[in-house]
Structures are given as C-alpha cells and as structure tokens.
Amino acid sequence: MARIDTWKRNRDFIVEEYKKQNKFIPIINNYYNKLIPFAYYHDRFGIAGLIKRIVFVFINIVGYFKPVPRGPIYKHELFETVTKTTALACQNFMMSLVAEGFDSCPMEGFDEKRIKKILKLNWKCHVVMIFGIGKADIKGVYGERFRIDEDLVIKEV
C-alpha cells in the first residue's frame, strides 16, 4: 500500500539509522531534512502547493544550468511518487520470492474498497497491487506464457 502521510515517520527512522552508523553526513542531512520535507509536505488547503509553485519558478531557472529535482509539486504528483516507490518495493518482494523458489503474479483491477475493508486499512492508504503467490504452471493459466517485446517498453540511452 502507498501512503502520503507517513513520510515524517519514515524520514525520522532513516535519519536515526544513519546516526547510529555515524554516517549522517551533510548531504544526507540536506536530503532528509530539507528536500524531503519540501517535496512531501502538503496541507488540506493547498497553501503548501501554492508556495511550491512559486519556488518552482526559481527551481526551473536553476534547472537550465544543472540537474535538479523538480517535484513533486502537487498532491497528485506526490501520490504518483509514493505509488512508484511502492511498486519498486513490490518488484523487490517479487524478486525475493523467486530467490526462495516461488513465483508471483502482480495484479491490478481489483476491488480496492473490499481489500481495504478486509485488511482494515484506513482511507489514507492506497492499495497499489495484489499478488498471487505460489508455483507457476509451466503451461500457463490461459495458454502458453509470453512476454511483450522489450523494444516496445524499454528505451536504452
């Protein structure tokens, strides 16, 4: 599940872990205590988004000369960011399953409201995907297994 309201808790945990390892260097401090709060903070009335839009003008000017993070600015962009992050965690989970001898099938198109009720998740949670986990049938479920051509979905730079 993805959430946009737990960033402070997660940031505090990560910062404490770096401090325990004596690895809390200035670049990490700037990232977690300046960039992350700026990017992830949002408010109910959209005032933070308005301020971010004003700052974004200056960030765009700097962006002409060097690479800079340019978002998320709006709440929907933040929602997209945490969904992508959760999808990456799901990929890591799926690779771990393969390492343990299991197969998985990530699925979209489910009844999110029912899933949230079963798992007792609140309205702030967004279910990104669900998994079927087990041993794959060599023959496939609906026929022979196949993959989309890589050239259609991967761009090499």
Image (spheres, rainbow, N blue to C red):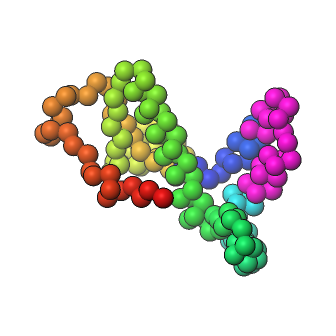
Given residues 124 and 136, the one toward you in this image is 136
Given residues 101 and 119, the one toward you in this image is 101
Expressed as whole percent of the image width and height from the top left, the position of residue 125 reads 54, 48
Asked if the stretch drawn in magenta spans residue 54, the answer is: no
Q: Main secondary structure of the magenta part?
A: helix
The number of callouts visible is 0
- Whether residue 19 appears in this view of the structure is yes
The residue depicted at 18 percent of the width and 34 percent of the height is 140
- Vertical placement of residue 17 versus 107, above or below: above
The residue depicted at 76 percent of the width and 77 percent of the height is 58
The residue depicted at 21 percent of the width and 28 percent of the height is 137
What stretch of residues is rendered in magenta? 14-36
- Vertical placement of residue 80 versus 94, above or below: below
The residue depicted at 47 percent of the width and 39 percent of the height is 90
Given residues 112 and 70, the one toward you in this image is 70
Which image quadrant is residue 136 in? Answer: top left
Farthest-out residue, front: 157
Expressed as whole percent of the image width and height from the top left, the position of residue 4 reads 62, 53
Farthest-out residue, left: 143
Q: Is residue 126 left or right of residue 47?
A: left
Expressed as whole percent of the image width and height from the top left, the position of residue 62 reads 75, 73
- Whether residue 47 appears in this view of the structure is no
Q: Is residue 105 left or right of residue 22?
A: left
Which image quadrant is residue 141 in? Answer: top left
Which image quadrant is residue 134 in? Answer: top left
- Vertical placement of residue 113 versus 79, above or below: above
Q: Is residue 139 left or right of residue 56?
A: left
Expressed as whole percent of the image width and height from the top left, the position of residue 24 reads 84, 39
